[in-house]
Image: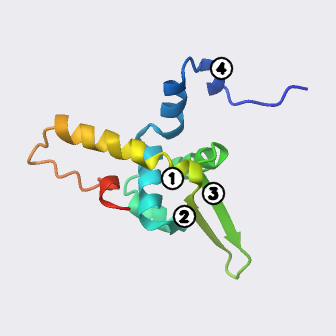
Amino acid sequence: MAKYKKKLEDDIRCPLEYGLTLFGGKWRSRIICVLFAHKKLRYSEIRKEMYNITDAVLAATLKDLIEDGLIKRKSYDEIPPRVEYSLTEKGKSVVPILQSICKWSGIFYKEDNDNEMVQCQKCDHHG
């Protein structure tokens, strides 16, 4: 029997699309930046950093990032149980790409004075 593959793999036509599927999108890139800045975080700490994400979306996005090998989940045998998330080597290797996008955007995105971008994770200010 054929191994189950995520549907998205059938739709990918080039390596760039594959990359953007893995780390593109509003939540994936922000979670990667947050974990890069803090090294290790519990679910509730990620949730706090992400402002307006819902639990369902955060849980699903974390699960996808784990499946795609960008983050790892470690549970500690404690009471109460403790679970921490951190970037894998593959996840860390995405950060310079996100930083480049950030720099490019900074050049072309004229910040509107009313819009302070309080939710910006400033992925280029760490490391």
Question: Is label 2 or label 4 in front?
Answer: 4
- Give how far apart the Cα atoms at labels 1 and 3 are: 11 Å
User: Disc 1, disc 3: CB below 8 Å?
Assistant: no
Residue on which the image places disc 3: 72
Q: Who comes first in sequence, dot 4 or dot 3?
A: 4
Q: Who comes first in sequence, dot 1 or dot 2?
A: 2
Farthest left residue?
Answer: 113
Give the structural element (helix, strand or loop) at label 4: helix
Give the structural element (helix, strand or loop) at label 2: helix
Q: Position of residue 52 (x, y in %)?
A: 38, 53
Q: Quadrant of residue 76?
A: bottom right
Residue on which the image places disc 4: 10
On screen, 104 above or below 90? above
On screen, 33 above or below 2? below
Question: Is label 1 or label 2 in front?
Answer: 1
Q: Amino acid at mark 2?
A: Tyr
On screen, 92 above or below 15? below
Q: Position of residue 84 (x, y in %)?
A: 60, 67
Q: Amino acid at mark 1?
A: Lys
In the image, what residue occupies the spot 26% across and 37% down? 104
Give the structural element (helix, strand or loop) at label 3: strand
Q: Who comes first in sequence, dot 4 or dot 1?
A: 4
Q: Who comes first in sequence, dot 1 or dot 3?
A: 3
Q: Amino acid at mark 3?
A: Lys
Mark 3: few, some, or many residues within 10 Å (few <14, many ≥20)?
Answer: some
Residue on which the image places disc 1: 92
